[in-house]
Amino acid sequence: MLVVGKNSNLARTRYHKKQAIHVKDTYRHKGLRRRLIGELQKKGISDERVLEAMGALPRHFFLDKAFEEWAYEDKPFPIGSEQTISQPYTVAYMSNLLNVQPREKVLEIGTGSGYQAAVLALMGGRVYTIERHESLYVKAKEMLHSLNMGNIRCFHRDGFKGLPEFAPFHKIMVTAGAPEVPEALRQQLAIGGLMVIPVGKNAQKMHCIERIDETRYDEKIMGDFRFVPFLKGVEKG
Ligand code: SAH
């Protein structure tokens, strides 16, 4: 069983009293979460920091009330604007690969519900996250703010362009299925940095890209996944 240390980021988190979204993290939720963490361990996730972060973070806060019952199933769920919160196994797998170290600058593309950004922040990253849907951006920003996660900055932008003014990043994670690896994201990766990105149109293969020097990248192709598409431009409203 995982216990979150007194000094972990979430232990320092104060839940906002006026928060509109449901904020109760009951013993039942905690029990279901522990069971999910056990399942992830059985599926091969071994990084204690990933398990600790996901064990501490109430996933049901990031889902609509209607799906609360299923928040601790290992499944993706709709979050509005035809988008989904990723399956916990996928979040754990990608976080494991990215191996965020305390204080590293991390860029996430595809904020969605904000859950993955929160996991990366609980691992100690200084997280910058971009979402193209304005309504999702607003909702996630409010949620992360209400959890007092000051080490996450949200942006309503087109992720294909990254965030040049804050580059370079030690780590980059893309959480939508990309037709190809955007050149701007390669350029914004620090030398020695790592990018995890699912590449493919209908189904994706996870790519893990390490920047060797100014011009060279080492690219490993891992398992199969299915993501919502990485689309150009932004959506208002
Ligand atoms: N990481 C999310 C799950 C994301 S689903 C979570 O933890 O909940 C993928 C998200 O990527 C969707 O919200 C989608 O709107 C967003 N997205 C797709 N293309 C994008 C782009 N070009 N720029 C920014 N976000 C994008």
Image (spheres, grey):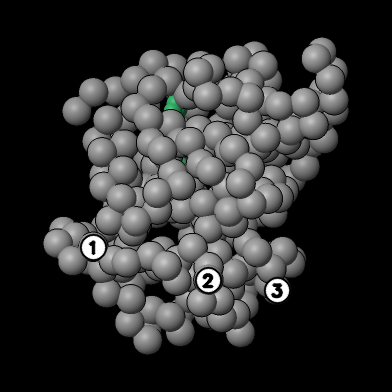
Q: CA distance from mark 2 to mark 3?
A: 27 Å
Mark earlier in primary sequence (2, 3): 2
Mark 3 Cα shell of 10 Å, populated few (<14), some (14-19), many (≥20): few
The residue under label 2 is: 7
Mark earlier in primary sequence (1, 3): 1
Mark 2 Cα shell of 10 Å, populated few (<14), some (14-19), many (≥20): few
Q: Are marks 2 and 3 in contact (CB under 8 Å)?
A: no
Percent x, y of residue 168: 63, 24
Closer to the camera: disc 1 or disc 3? 1
230 sits to left or right of 206: left
Q: Residue at x 52, y 51 (%)?
A: 121
Q: Quadrant of residue 11?
A: bottom left
The residue under label 3 is: 42
Q: Secondary structure at mark 1?
A: loop
Mark 3 C-beta closer than 8 Å to ligand 1: no
The residue under label 1 is: 16
Give the residue type that dot 3 points to: Lys
Seen from the viewer's position, the closer of residues 40 and 165 is 165
Seen from the viewer's position, the closer of residues 163 and 97 is 163
Q: Is residue 11 above or below residue 91?
A: below
179 sits to left or right of 97: left
Mark 2 C-beta closer than 8 Å to ligand 1: no
